[in-house]
């Protein structure tokens, strides 16, 4: 089966059928060539319902998790978005396909370099890839309309909340290896408002505003 068919089937079975409603997110995920963001040997599995290893002990997130985050972040055309935990660059490409001005940050330089290549090859060369501790955000580019975190944090990273516009959304998995919830937090004049929370599973966010110590996980 060709990649386009596999992509269509992924959108139908893994996303639409499980409750992803935002038609723009479904359309973006019909367009981004996920096979370009996995290891060449894994291309036949690119549209499977699982995270896949991308090196350095990290993974490209399961398609459903990317869709859930993109929907929760309410990314619009022209939104300025920060994607924390670039990994393969796939989620950043989905945000770019939604029409956002995308900044993404990865702590492992080799992965950031690979993501830059993946993004260029797939036609998303205007995504800005930063290297560093994304638990501290990218202050020089703030504020952001949405910040999406692809690794689990012990709590709401305060620096990320501070880098939102009022009304902006922070989407972040919170919790340890035993269980996590994907929290959606809106910045309001009265402080953080948690609007939504569902169970999920991500690799750890490692850094000053994350878990101290070394990365790893699935
Ligand atoms: N969105 C990615 C998912 C990658 S998994 C994709 O679609 O492929 C999460 C990534 O977060 C890993 O690459 C990991 O190295 C990175 N990460 C963990 N802690 C981080 C931190 N503090 N700053 C930046 N990246 C971090």
Image: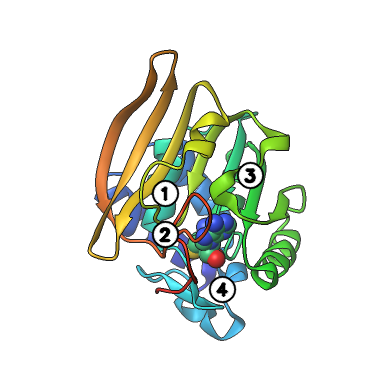
What residue did someone put label 1 on? Answer: 67
Q: Are discs 1 and 2 less than 8 Å apart at CB?
A: yes
Residue at image location 60% in from the left, 37% down from the top? 81
Residue 23, image x and y in percent?
Answer: 42, 37
Residue 84, image x and y in percent?
Answer: 55, 50
Does the image show residue 85?
Answer: no
Q: Residue furthest bottom?
A: 41
* First of labels 2, 3 by sequence position: 2
What residue did someone put label 4 on? Answer: 38
Local secondary structure at mark 1: helix
| Alpha carbon separation for disc pair 3 and 4 | 18 Å
| Alpha carbon separation for disc pair 4 and 2 | 12 Å
Compare residues 209 and 89 and report the one nearer the observer.
209
Compare residues 84 and 101 and report the one nearer the observer.
84
* First of labels 4, 1 by sequence position: 4
Compare residues 111 and 154 and report the one nearer the observer.
154
| Alpha carbon separation for disc pair 1 and 2 | 6 Å
* First of labels 3, 4 by sequence position: 4
What residue did someone put label 2 on? Answer: 63
């Amino acid at each position: 089966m060709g990649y386009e068919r596999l992509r269509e089937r992924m959108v139908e079975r893994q996303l639409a059928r499980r409750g992803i409603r935002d038609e723009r997110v479904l359309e973006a995920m019909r367009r981004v060539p996920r096979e370009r963001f996995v290891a060449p040997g894994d291309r036949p599995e690119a549209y499977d319902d699982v995270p896949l290893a991308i090196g350095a002990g990290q993974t490209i997130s399961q398609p459903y998790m990317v869709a859930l985050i993109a929907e929760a972040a309410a990314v619009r055309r022209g939104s300025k978005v920060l994607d924390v935990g670039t990994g393969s660059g796939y989620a950043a490409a989905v945000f770019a396909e939604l029409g956002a001005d995308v900044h993404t940050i990865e702590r492992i330089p080799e992965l950031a370099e690979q993501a830059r290549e993946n993004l260029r090859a797939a036609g998303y060369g205007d995504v800005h890839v930063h290297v560093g501790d994304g638990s501290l955000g990218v202050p020089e580019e703030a504020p952001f309309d949405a910040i999406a975190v692809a690794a689990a944090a012990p709590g709401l990273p305060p620096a990320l909340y501070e880098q939102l516009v009022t009304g902006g959304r922070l989407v972040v998995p919170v919790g340890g290896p035993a269980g996590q919830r994907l929290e959606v937090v809106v910045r309001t004049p009265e402080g953080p408002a948690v609007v939504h929370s569902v169970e999920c599973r991500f690799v750890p966010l490692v850094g000053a505003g994350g878990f101290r110590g070394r990365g790893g996980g699935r």
